[in-house]
Image: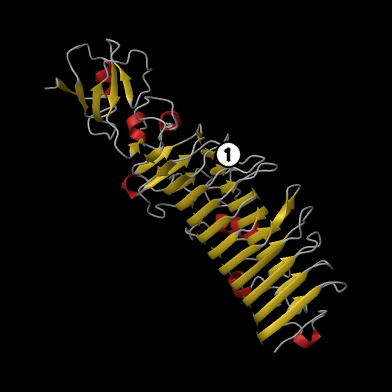
Amino acid sequence: MANVATFTTIGTLRANASTTLSVAYIQGYYAALDGGGGTFVLNASDGSTADNGGTIIVDSQGQRWYREVEGTISIKWFGAKVDGVTDDSSAIQTAITWMQGGGHDAYAGDGGILYFPPGTTLINDGITIARGGITLQGMGWEEYFGLQGSSTPGVIGSHGSFILTTVTSGSPITITATANHCAIKDLAFSQTQPADTVGWTPTVYPPTIYIAGNAAAGGAVLLERLFAWNCYSFIQAGDTGNAVGRTTMKHIWGMPLNTGITIKFAADTVQIDDVHFWQFDQNVPNIIAWIQAHGAGIRSIRNDNPLISNIFIFGYNVGIQFSGSTDGCTARCHGSNIDLDSVNVGIQYLSISSGSPPSAQFVNLAHQCPGNGTSGIANNAALRIEAGAAGVFVDICNFRSTFSGGSVIAINNTTADVAVTNLWAENWNTSNTGAPIVSVPGGLTTVTLSGRLRQSGGHGAALSNMPINSSHVN
């Protein structure tokens, strides 16, 4: 029968002087019942493996103790305090390194689930996932508790699993191009920001979750059931010259300040489904005003064949913004069930510098300007194609726009090709500048209207006066 002893903490196991024990029950990491305890078994044949602070402990006699590991691994096993004050970056990275193969051969290197328990986990030094098969898993969250701009870093204690960042030196989580098929689930993220005051501006942070790519396109990543609180830029996939591969984002919610999702370079299909970016805290008018003037829900730069569905974005300057870089632009985008509410510009195309012509097809697209059009901003539009966005092809089926400050569709170059089937234009041109439903500069621009046109409450030109080159309305 095994010789068994109970130790209060990991530290007391390290201090063990007995050479007759074979099993040790540890009550906690720093203190009993703090979540860091477990059962350890002596490995008498191992005389060299280093103490990693979580799954391998070396006692005062040089004996190696191995934690019994079955399924989920807790960050508390490696010394994370989850108190919102202590930087737990090193403990979490040690756990990830062990899961990636940096430890005992019988357990390490097989990936697995790394659990973030309820409370606030401070990550200021950043953690990196460099291998697939690893899932960062929280227990969910309560959407918020306290004021958006207050010193309260978010929901604390039993309200959910929050990751807090208070420094701007790097991304809290980086997923490298070699991390094929890893995932982040059921976690909320927070960054400290100034309190709400007149003239408020946010503290600029790197992306909260950064999915790095490479020249050949990185591996598949799944992001699911995540919440952003006070985050300047929430998710970024790829970077200039470095592409990501298959990336899926599902159930992404919150109130990111500057950008919710940025796709800089994706050379394989990106799927974005069930996004809800909303002004969760209505008690911070200056923060809300800043987001309304600067924020964008989704920014897509170089993105091949993205699938975007079931999107609700409220209170931002731009709902979905397309642009380009030296890597190219976004082509063959497919979007469905998109509601852009209280947004100055619903879908915007900025300058496109290189690559194949940008193109998109949308089904069931709705847009409404802020304040039911009371702001009367002439540049408000459901669809804006800027002068530098050459050769844009956009098809929209079932398109409703309400209270645009100017035109519903504003095209500012002569090479766009836009086709709309079933357009419902309500109360356009609230700025009273005489803008028609569709405005184009003439020349080679092609706009085709088909299906049913509903128009009501507009202050600009009727359909018969719109300067479009091709129209067919049944």
Is 184 left, or right, of 396 in this rendering?
Answer: left
Kindly identify which residue carries mark 1: 177
Return the x and y of residue 19 as percentages of the image width and height: 20, 11
User: Given the current orientation, which residue lies at the most extreme bottom position?
Assistant: 474
Q: How many marks?
A: 1
Is 123 left, or right, of 289 in this rendering?
Answer: left
Return the x and y of residue 94 as percentages of the image width and height: 42, 28
44 up-or-down from 202: above or below: above
Is 393 left, or right, of 37 in this rendering?
Answer: right
In the rendered image, the quadrant that contains the N terminus is: top left
Which quadrant of the figure has residue 152? top left
Return the x and y of residue 32 as percentages of the image width and height: 22, 30
In the rendered image, the quadrant that contains the C terminus is: bottom right
User: Given the current orientation, which residue lies at the most extreme right position?
Assistant: 443
In this view, the residue in front, 291 or 209, is 209
In this view, the residue in front, 233 or 353, is 353
Q: Residue at x 72, y 54 (%)?
A: 329
Q: Secondary structure at mark 1?
A: loop
Crowd rating for badge 1 (residues with CA inside 10 Å; few <14, some 14–19, many 20+): many
Which quadrant of the figure has residue 340? bottom right
Q: How is the image coloured?
A: secondary structure
Three-letter residue code for mark 1: Ala
Q: Evaluate whether residue 427 shows in this view.
A: no
Is 391 left, or right, of 396 in this rendering?
Answer: right
Q: Evaluate whether residue 310 shows in this view.
A: yes
174 up-or-down from 440: above or below: above
346 up-or-down from 153: above or below: below
Return the x and y of residue 362 as percentages of the image width and height: 63, 70
In this view, the residue in front, 44 or 424, is 44
